[in-house]
Amino acid sequence: MAKRTVVVLTGATAGVGRATARRLAKPGVCLGLLARGAAGLEATRAEVEAKGAEALALATDVADAAQVEAAAQAVEERFGPPDVWINNAMTSVFSPVRELQPEEVLRVTEVTYLGQVYGTMAALRRMLPRDAGVIVQVGSALAYRGIPLQAAYCGAKHAIQGFTESLRCELIHDRSRVRITMVQMPGMNTPQFGWVKSRLPHRAQPVPPIYQPEVAAEAIAFAIRHPRRQMLVGGSTVKAVEGNKLAAFWLDYYLGRTGFKAQQTAEAEDPQRADNLWRPVDEDRGAHGSFDERAQGTSRELWLAMHRPAGWGWAVVAGSLAAGGAAAWKMRTREEPRRWRANDEPRMHQRRA
């Protein structure tokens, strides 16, 4: 009998998680699907089983370590220990820091950061004794470069990056065959923008360019099979990560000038709509958000990363640095920082008035 591949996937019911479940589903794959919403869980389970995979849907709040461990135990009892664990669950709040509430920051941190920590720890308990397994952290360009209006989420993604680097060093020290990788995502066309908590006057949107969640799913599937320290998905992620290394100050200025508008559509937000910060919006919304007409279904940078020849790593790094440097220089020369022009300060206040 052929060995089955056991995969645990958090945040499995929508967006990147839903697209990843579909991408991985095939005969011989057993999927442990972890999420909060019953409607999405049932729909995802039905989809992957229709593709020949076995599935176990488990209502789980990843902010609760005991629930994550219980879900891991249930998957192990049903299918065996996990070969792959994908930490994808997240939540956010679109809000200026001055309006954030402490409990909101705590909740975003518990789900987006500690959810990945708890998932990783549950995976390690089952992988280290076998000296085998792959852990995939679904990250973001925002793990390297913070942007306005998403401080709690950016902080959580930065924390995941640091946690993952620490663990990777420990695995190397122990000469473990357990592998951990982080896939850094660009703006994605997912349902989160329709159910994330928001204080913005207009409807939230991903920072363009926008990519379809299937692009992310392809990157995750590749990262499972190939030993990469991390993968940068989309040209915007490459520019954000590498540009921040070269010209962080100018990105501060550029994002301060453009980041508010870039994250909002022209459509007014409904302040009464339901959000999923504290409890799920129990609807099946699938993988895609409402930006299909603007979203790209492919990524040239991902294709290059997946098809690079052996020994080409430095060339990729050099190309990324060049792209980041060009982006940073363009931002620098586009407009001189007004904060260095003392005489302009009164005029700035007049425009804001």
Image: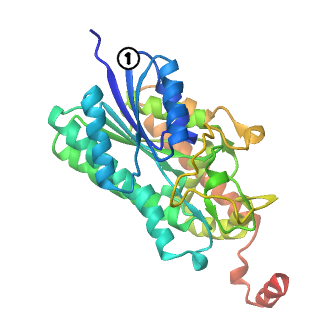
Q: Residue at x 24, y 43 (%)?
A: 124
**161 lies left or right of 259:** left
- Of the pair 333 and 152, the residue shown nearer to us: 152
Q: What is the count of numbered marks?
A: 1
Q: Name the image quarter holding residue 190.
A: top right
Residue 261: which quarter of the image? bottom right
**As drawn, 197 above or below 139:** below
At which x and y percent is residue 262? 72, 59
Q: Residue at x 49, y 52 (%)?
A: 90
In this picture, is 270 found above or below 42? below
Mark 1 residue type: Gly
For the N terminus, give its image quadrant: top left
x 45%, y 56%: residue = 112
Q: Percent position (x, y) of residue 350?
A: 84, 87
Residue pointed to by mark 1: 28
Assign the C terminus to one quadrant of the image: bottom right
> Foreground residue, 23 or 55?
55
Secondary structure beneath dot 1 equals loop
232 and 93: which is toward the camera: 93
Judge the density around disc 1: few (<14), some (14-19), many (≥20) Cα neighbours within 10 Å. Answer: some
Res. 165 in view: no
Where is residue 181 shown, x and y percent of the image?
Answer: 38, 41
Horizontal relation, residue 323 to residue 140: left or right: right
